Image: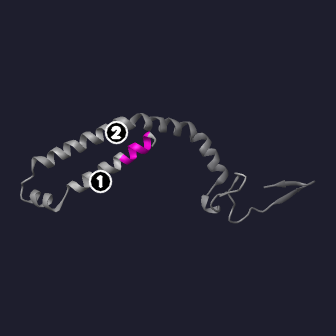
Amino acid sequence: MSGMKQLAAFTVAACLVLSLTVSPATAEAEDKGEVGEGLSLMEEGAKLLFRGLMDEMEPALEDLQGLADEMAPAFAELMGMIGDFTNYHAPEVLPNGDIIIRRKVPLKVELLGEGEIEL
C-alpha cells in the first residue's frame, strides 16, 4: 500500500474507534456529571493522533498547493476553451487510448470560402 493509502486507512480506522467510544453509557455518565478519566484520556489520545496526522500530511498538502498554483493558468485557459461542462457528454476512452469528449449539441460549422472551415 502506498503511503497516502496507508494514511487514509489509518485515519478512517481512528475515526471509527473514536466514534465507538461515545456510547449511550458515556452520554448518561456525562448527564450525571460523572465523566470518567478514561474518556478524558481518549480525548487527549485523539487530539495527539490528529495533531500527528496533520504534521505528517503538511508537506504533502504544501506540495498540492504548489501544484495547484502552477496549474492555475493552464486550467483557466482550458476552462475558457471548454466553457460549461453541462454542454458535454461523459468522456469516452477509445480502444487505442484516445479520449473523446463529445458535445451534446454539435457546434454549427460555417464555411468561410475556398474550403476553409471555422469551428
- Asked whether the residues under the numbered discs 1 and 2 touch, taking CB atoms below 8 Å apart as contact, a structural biologist would say no
| Residue found at the far top of this picture | 59
| Residue found at the far front of this picture | 1
Number of other residues with Cα within 10 Å of mark 1, as a class: few under 14, some 14 to 19, many 20 or more: few
Image x and y of residue 56, in percent: 36, 35
Q: Amino acid at mark 1?
A: Leu
Any mark on residue 54, and which? 2
| Residue found at the far right of this picture | 114
5 within the magenta span: yes
Above or below, 48 against 110 in this view is above
Write the start and end of the magenta stretch as one range.
Answer: 3-9
- Residue visible at 71% across and 52% down in the picture: 98
Secondary structure mainly formed by the magenta segment: helix
Image quarter hosting the N terminus:
top left
Left or right of 79? Residue 7 is left
Image x and y of residue 34, in percent: 6, 54
Label 1, secondary structure: give it: helix
Left or right of 111? Residue 27 is left
Any mark on residue 55, and which? none
Choose the circle earlier in sequence order: 1 or 2. 1
Q: Nearer the viewer, mark 1 or mark 2?
A: 1
Q: How is the image coloured?
A: one colour
Left or right of 87? Residue 60 is left
Above or below, 55 against 46 in this view is above
Residue that label 1 marks: 16
- Residue visible at 65% across and 53% down in the picture: 82
